[in-house]
Image: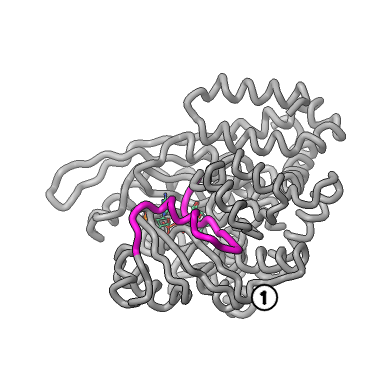
Amino acid sequence: MTNKYLVNVFEKVKQKNPYELEFQQAVYEVLNSIEPYVNEHKEIEELNIIERLVEPERIITFRVPWLNDEGKVCVNRGYRVQFNSAIGPYKGGLRFHPSVNQSIIKFLGFEQTLKNSLTGLFMGGAKGGSDFDPKGKSDKEIMSFCQSFMTELYQHIGPDTDIPAGDIGVGKKEIGYLFGQYKRITNTFVGTITGKPLEFGGSLGRTEATGYGLAYYTSKMLEEMSNTNYKDKKVIISGSGNVALYTLEKVTNLGGKVIAMSDSNGYILDENGIDFKVLQEIKEVKKERISKYVETIKTAKYFENAKQMWTIKCDIALACATQNEIDLDCAKILVANNVILVGEGANMPCTIEATNYFIENKVLFAPAKAANCGGVMVSGFEMSQNSSRTIWSKQEVDDKLKQQMENILHEVLACAKHYGNPYDTVLGANITGFKKVANAMISQGVI
Ligand code: NDP
């Protein structure tokens, strides 16, 4: 990055947020990649758009006291970062995980702003969550926590203001408790939260959307950039949560063979391909660890150390677990093993060094903002259905998702090509997302 304006803004970001390493990383990646656009558009610097873009519009932090099953009072910290509302009401998920802190929520909110812009819908960027760990908690404890969390959050959100959804640790159960408390406090039944169960306003196809979207995006990428497809390709997918599971299902339907998947403790390997139904039962119904898979499928093996999974020889690697799971060392192994495509189902799962290594080595790279935006896109569809009190069929949702994922790929590739490197899809995605937000900020004046 050589543009003085961008360098200065990034220096200020570091000074103002010295301990927020994930946030710094996300900002650096974006500023570095939008440089050619900023060089061409002098008004970006004149109106100081970038310094405004990297400063969240609002950060809300709050105490979340709740009672555990022993009657003990527990306290967690809650966050909502309302990052940017230039192109629509704030929209982004809630993450409940012990690793949650302000840096992580800010990096996610910042990325969400550009991702939501890429979906083509009118949604601003936000993210929230808590360092609460739902793992090992009873339903009663989770409900107690969710009700307390919403008792504070409700005053900051609304169907035209800020619409939270799920993320790591926040699935249908948590969304149900959060929605129930919101409804009770506000005495309204509106689409303020997405990812709801179908019985009270959820959208068909939302559960599958991020994974399916990733599969559609990467499948089209293989076709357009390598004249190939998923058929008989060896695929590895990290994680075994919502995104990973539905990526497994769609990739398998498209003819790919998913040979390895993981959780934070370890990974399973089966050269015959992992069975979606068996894994879904273990993860979604029985809520067990991935290691249980080998008890049902005898050809599969389980190994401790999830990171080692990236050393398996594969054609396609899809990172669907968490941030920074693929570093430069992993990237070097994947490239040495002749990986064709790396896709980001999780947010920022590849470090900057790993991403650059893939692009330099002409690996097809599907960056998170574009490749995993299917989830928030269908959340946008859920908002439309809630406002118009209509229900779309699963087929209608899926057709729209597939079409829009392919449109986004085309926009990203056209932009990357325009700036000289068709493999630099990070530049393509960031500039495409940024342009719309920047133009909206310019039109709306100094606010
Ligand atoms: P889940 O909580 O459903 O699943 C996360 C999975 O990742 C779990 O299987 C978890 O295992 C595993 N995991 C966590 N850390 C590691 C690690 N270091 N190595 C291997 N596996 C690990 O979350 P989601 O599937 O919803 O989200 C996954 C990612 O996708 C996140 O980055 C999220 O922000 C992003 N995303 C999600 C969207 C959605 O619609 N859900 C939309 C867009 C992005 P364990 O059980 O051991 O913790």
The answer to whether the residue bearing label 1 lies less than 8 angstroms from the nearest atom of ligand 1 is no
Label 1 secondary element: helix
Q: Position of residue 303 (x, y in %)?
A: 35, 59
Place residue 405 in its image quadrant.
bottom right
**Residue 314: in magenta span:** yes
Q: Is residue 195 visible?
A: no
Q: Is residue 318 left or right of residue 174?
A: right
Q: Which residue is mark 1?
A: 399
The quadrant of the image that shows the N terminus is: top right
Q: Amino acid at mark 1?
A: Asp
Q: Position of residue 191 (x, y in %)?
A: 52, 61
- Residue 308 vs residue 263, the one in the foreground: 308
Quarter of the displayed picture in which ligand 1 can be seen: bottom left
Q: Is residue 268 left or right of residue 190?
A: left
- Residue 439 vs residue 89, the one in the foreground: 439
Identify the residue shown where x is 82% and y is 54%. 414
Place residue 79 in its image quadrant.
top left
Spot the residue most to the left. 70
Q: Is residue 295 visible?
A: yes
Identify the residue shown where x is 56% and y is 19%. 15
Q: Is residue 265 depicted above or below 10 in this figure? A: below
Q: Position of residue 204 (x, y in %)?
A: 53, 74
**Residue 42: in magenta span:** no
- Residue 97 vs residue 305, the one in the foreground: 305
Q: Is residue 380 depicted above or below 101 in this figure? A: below
Q: Position of residue 227 (x, y in %)?
A: 76, 69
Identify the residue shown where x is 44% and y is 58%. 239
- Per the rendered image, the range of residues in magenta is 302-323
Identify the residue shown where x is 66% and y is 46%. 114
Q: Is residue 142 depicted above or below 114 in this figure? A: below
- Residue 83 vs residue 277, the one in the foreground: 277
